[in-house]
Image (cartoon, grey):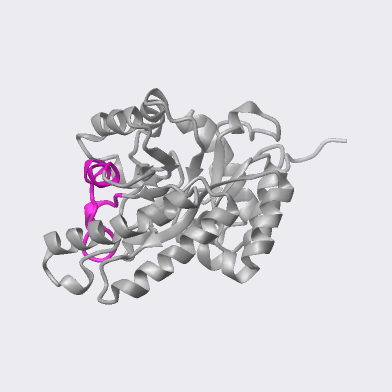
Amino acid sequence: MTGAPTARTAPRDVPSGRPAAVPTPQPGDPRLARLAVNQMTVRSWGVRDLVQGCLRAGIPAVGLWREPVAEAGLSAAARWVRDAGLRVSSYCRGGFLTGADRAAALDDNRRAVDEAAELGAACLVMVVGGLGAHGRDLPGARARVADALAELAPYAAERGVRLGLEPLHPMFCADRAVLSTLGQALDLAETLPGAGVVVDAYHVWWDPQVAEQIRRAGAAHRIVSFQTCDWTLPLPADVLEGRGMPGDGHVDLRALRTAVDAAGYTGDIEVEIFNADVWAADPDDVIATIARRHVQHVL
């Protein structure tokens, strides 16, 4: 008996609804071996849902966030990941070190380090903070970040947790990260025991020095995470939600992946998307699209 193709036999990408350009990789496909899904990409799912969804899709790693982990309970979240045989590709997030209460920020970051250690996360992603209490004093904010990290990094190293300094696109300099380039992040990471950098395609693709800095980071074994998504236009009113599905925008993701691989990075390739249309879609369909786009545009 025949009939119209089903969504399973004729998949469509989300959020575009276009027919898929490549078949959906199935569990066990070696092309999925390094793929990770960040929790914010399917933010309607809690930790257990994310773990089970990645198991169904054959994706071996998850990027976790502190808030869903706290909701699930740290011990339970660690057990679910461990029992499923998955890896924690990253733990988000530490940082925000430029506020008025330095002591409170450091205490919270120490807790984040402890959580990352229990989860066995490959790194604790550090979004270092914007201008914060410094008003317009950008050099002062950067000095405050460096000072706080110098105190935090030994604590993380003692617990086997790698801090991953993530440079953010300059449009986030005022409110989220006074580290705007991979070179800036690496300059700071090289002063800290065990620290490294996060190469997030959304934030670094535009930088004319990105290839050189990836080589530099790789030579020092300081690439701790590689994240993919795409830069799509027009930017939404909330630019934080402007990340597109790989292949929907302007970033040469394959070139960046080739560069980090050539630099010696062998870790997970984590898809982190903040996008209202992606969030509104069925999470299983989102993960299937991610797997196809990973094959088509990243590998």
Relative to residue 265, is residue 56 drawn left or right? right
Image coordinates for residue 54, horizontal then vertical, percent: 66, 47
Q: Nearer the viewer, residue 107 or 58?
A: 107
Residue at 49 percent across and 28 percent down: it is 299
27 above or below 111? above
Relative to residue 96, is residue 12 drawn left or right? right
73 above or below 179? below
Task: Tell me where residue 182 sits by quadrant.
Answer: top left
Please state the total of marks drawn on the protein image. Answer: 0
The magenta-colored residue range is 167-190
Image coordinates for residue 143, horizontal then vertical, percent: 18, 59
Q: Nearer the viewer, residue 214 or 233?
A: 214
Q: Is residue 124 visible?
A: no
Image coordinates for residue 75, horizontal then vertical, percent: 66, 63
Relative to residue 143, is residue 159 drawn left or right? right
Q: Is residue 55 visible?
A: yes
Residue at 64 percent across and 55 percent down: it is 50
Residue at 29 percent across and 72 percent down: it is 102
Residue at 47 percent across and 62 percent down: it is 112
Query: Residue farthest to the right?
Result: 1
Quarter of the image with the N terminus in it: top right
182 above or below 180? above
Task: Tell me where residue 108 sits by quadrant.
Answer: bottom left
